[in-house]
Amino acid sequence: MEKIDAARSGKPGTEKIAFLGLGHMGAAMARQLIGTAHPLTVWNRTPAKAEQLVAEGATLAASPAEAVRDADVVITMLADPAAVAAVADAIVGELRPGTTWVEMSTVGPDAVKELATRLKDGVTLVDAPVAGSTDKAAAGELGILAGGDVAGVEHVLARFGKVTRTGPLGSGAALKVVVNTAVVGGVALVAEAMALADALGIDEDTARTTLANGPLGGAVHRAFAEGVHFDTSLAVKDADLATRSARLPVMEAVREQYRSAAADPAVAHEDIAKAAAHIRRSA
């Protein structure tokens, strides 16, 4: 895969950008476009989530169709395949020839390829999901996994972080499923390792530090992370995407652990670190 340094990715243009989806990640990403040469229109199903961006200079659209009508670049950052399909129903007929739609949600390659079949001639689709959580989004330091013909929007994607060209359309979405499988699987394994340490009477700090210095160090950090957000219910969705794509017995077990955590209202929409704590308690 070719890696492209954001600082060398080309001069920003003045394309009109529509950004649809202002959840934890989308709002932080859209903010990276405020104050640039790109006129920015935003839309969210809950308009109140756009208020701060509007105060900072974005324009709020009343509907997805209104948001994209004059856009040169459309960016979607939505929760799941159903949300992307619903927005597609609203915007496909409004996209003008020459528009590029950058689909940045985690929906898997099949959903991306289905979107491509719905587009009019002259509309380009790029899949560019991201690696990293809300802290990286706020800092403009995400990893962008870009599939398809990204040349025309590379300078826009570089606003969000470092771009990696993954190959043809759908390859970015496919790699994102692989990445998230490793993340949620690693966090669940750390949770169970800590449960074992509890059962064996090992001091928590000693166990955590030792694990952090081993091959699962990154997963340990993520399992105890604070100030970031990867919704536990979305981890269940990502595990579903993975296990529908290949036979993954370990991931099937991990999916059930997250599903159990997401059944707890106090955990369902909290970060996966809370799911890790739930898995640890439940072991």
Image: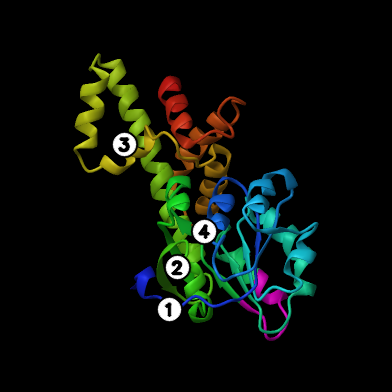
Evaluate if marks 3 and 4 touch, with contact meaning CB atoms under 8 Å apart: no
Q: Quadrant of the C terminus?
A: top left
Residue 30 locus on image (x, y percent): 57, 57
Residue 184 locus on image (x, y percent): 43, 43
Q: Amino acid at mark 4?
A: Gln
Would residue 266 be counted in the magenta stretch?
A: no
Evaluate if marks 1 and 3 touch, with contact meaning CB atoms under 8 Å apart: no
Say which residue label 2 marks: 158
- Whether residue 1 is visible to the viewer of this picture, yes or no, is no
The alpha-carbon separation of the residues under discs 1 and 3 comes to: 37 Å
Q: Which residues are magenta?
A: 115-124
Of the residues tagged 4 and 2, which is closer to the observer? 4
Residue found 76% across the figure and 67% down from its top:
91
Q: Amino acid at mark 1?
A: Gly
Between 134 and 61, the one lying in front of the other is: 61
Say which residue label 3 marks: 220
Nearer the N terminus, badge 1 or badge 2?
1
State the SS at label 4.
loop
Q: Is residue 108 above or below residue 209?
A: below
Q: How dense is the environment of label 4, judged by Cα within 10 Å: few (below 14), some, or many (20 and up)?
A: some
Say which residue label 4 marks: 32
Would residue 116 be counted in the magenta stretch?
A: yes
Residue 132 locus on image (x, y percent): 43, 51
